[in-house]
Amino acid sequence: MLGQGLTIPTLAARQAAGGLEFNFIAGRYLVQGGGFSTFVGTSGVSFARASSGLAETASGVLVPFGSGLPRLTDRGLLIEEARTNKVTIYNANPVDLTGVTRSGDAASTLSLVSDAAALAAAGLASVVTGGQVFKLDNSAGVTTAFATFSGATGNTNPHRATLYVRGGTGVVAMAGSGSAAFSASAGYVRRETAMTPDTAARTFYVRADAGQVVHFILPMLEEGGFATSPIVTQGAATTRAADVCSVSGLATLLVAPYAVVAHADLPSADGVNRRLATINALGSETGRISLVRDGSNQAGASPNPGNPSVVTGKTGARILRIAAQVGADKARAAVDGVLAADPAALSLGTGQDRIALGSAATGAASWLGGYLQSVRIAPGVMLDADLTAASVA
């Protein structure tokens, strides 16, 4: 049962009639009684990204999206902060070896080869359209061989290096700054390592162990504490702009009491503040209510002003489901089927008229960095048992 005698089907009906439902996987978009066939065509929706971008399907296929288009796949809506790939080569469709330097065992060779079948099997064919990849052949070597990519860090802040590799064993590394060994793999696997460069001139490399052959493509060097989706470069460092998304015109809906539910597919990076949704007034952080996994890996509802209602230990890659009942003096959350402690009452902000999806109210911080699967808002009171159920499915 729900408060005020509302059953779950009744809540769903009220949500459809006077609430909001975005199911990004099913492609269903409802706002206050109106149904829409596309997300960007939905009443009140604003979406921007001033660049192209890539997103992944549930089966691991990389899909390209043009500038300004939301990255919607069967995993949901991908929302990320701006990042720059500092590698200065043609990393997806190389035409020669410019910017990639071989070193190490003298018997090793570096070349471009066709690998279309393996690329297709790995879901990379729509991005690596030419079918060519780099091949570091150290099969005759007795020591290690290296392929180093042009494009320096430019500072000594933490970075992440990634690339897709198949074949034998080796390492992704930066001299004196971090490395990650990889095992043999018949198909392409995206390999990643954390790096904190000791000088601003550092670049990164892939190493083939003695007697090994590795094929690789889409090298990426980005500043930050976690990796984001691949960024294609064409001979120069390239920036993918931030995804900025909000829904306005919701003032009549966002009057307490109401319930808000969001589900998201998060990456494994922990200790990063990731917001699923932020209810706010005119893009202000003052008076907002956010559904979030914070830097301490707590997840739940976080109002400002107000007291948070969170569940601890929400670490790692996961499907995160948060439901919150918002009243005039507090917001209580349930996360993945666990009801958070009831927070002490403290008057919440009023006048909310919009919801930022996958970021802070300003659209300039606390990006989700993952796939938003669904968001729902429904007027009325939801009892604890139903709040918990909404955080499961």
Image: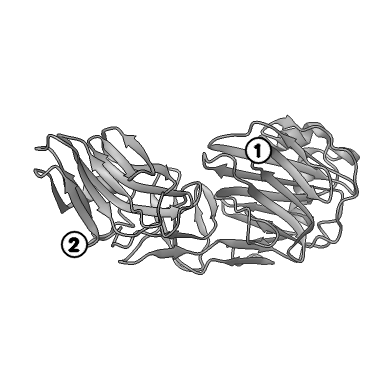
Residue 25 or 347: which is nearer the viewer? 347
Asked if the residues shown at circle 2 and circle 1 are in contact, with their CB atoms under 8 angstroms apart, the answer is no
- Whether 202 is drawn above or below 311: the answer is below
The N terminus: image quadrant: top right
Residue 193 or 258: which is nearer the viewer? 193
Residue 248 lies left or right of residue 107; in this view the side is: right
Please state the total of marks drawn on the protein image. Answer: 2
Q: Which residue position is annotated with label 2?
A: 96
Q: Which mark is residue 296?
A: 1
Residue type at the position of mark 1: Ser
- Tag 1, which secondary structure? loop
Name which residue lies at 76% across and 54% down: 19
Judge the density around disc 1: few (<14), some (14-19), many (≥20) Cα neighbours within 10 Å: some
Q: Is residue 158 visible?
A: yes
- Residue 151 locus on image (x, y percent): 34, 60
- Residue 36 locus on image (x, y percent): 63, 62
Q: Which callout, 2 or 1, points at the residue further toward the start of the chain?
A: 2
Name which residue lies at 79% across and 49% down: 303
Judge the density around disc 2: few (<14), some (14-19), many (≥20) Cα neighbours within 10 Å: few
- Tag 2, which secondary structure? loop
- Residue 4 locus on image (x, y percent): 90, 41
Name which residue lies at 64% across and 53% down: 22
Q: Quadrant of residue 154?
A: bottom left
- Residue 62 locus on image (x, y percent): 39, 52
Residue 198 lies left or right of residue 323; in this view the side is: left
Residue 59 or 282: which is nearer the viewer? 282
Residue 5 lies left or right of residue 41; in this view the side is: right
- Whether 362 is drawn above or below 224: the answer is below
Q: Quadrant of residue 168?
A: top left
Residue 34 or 357: which is nearer the viewer? 357
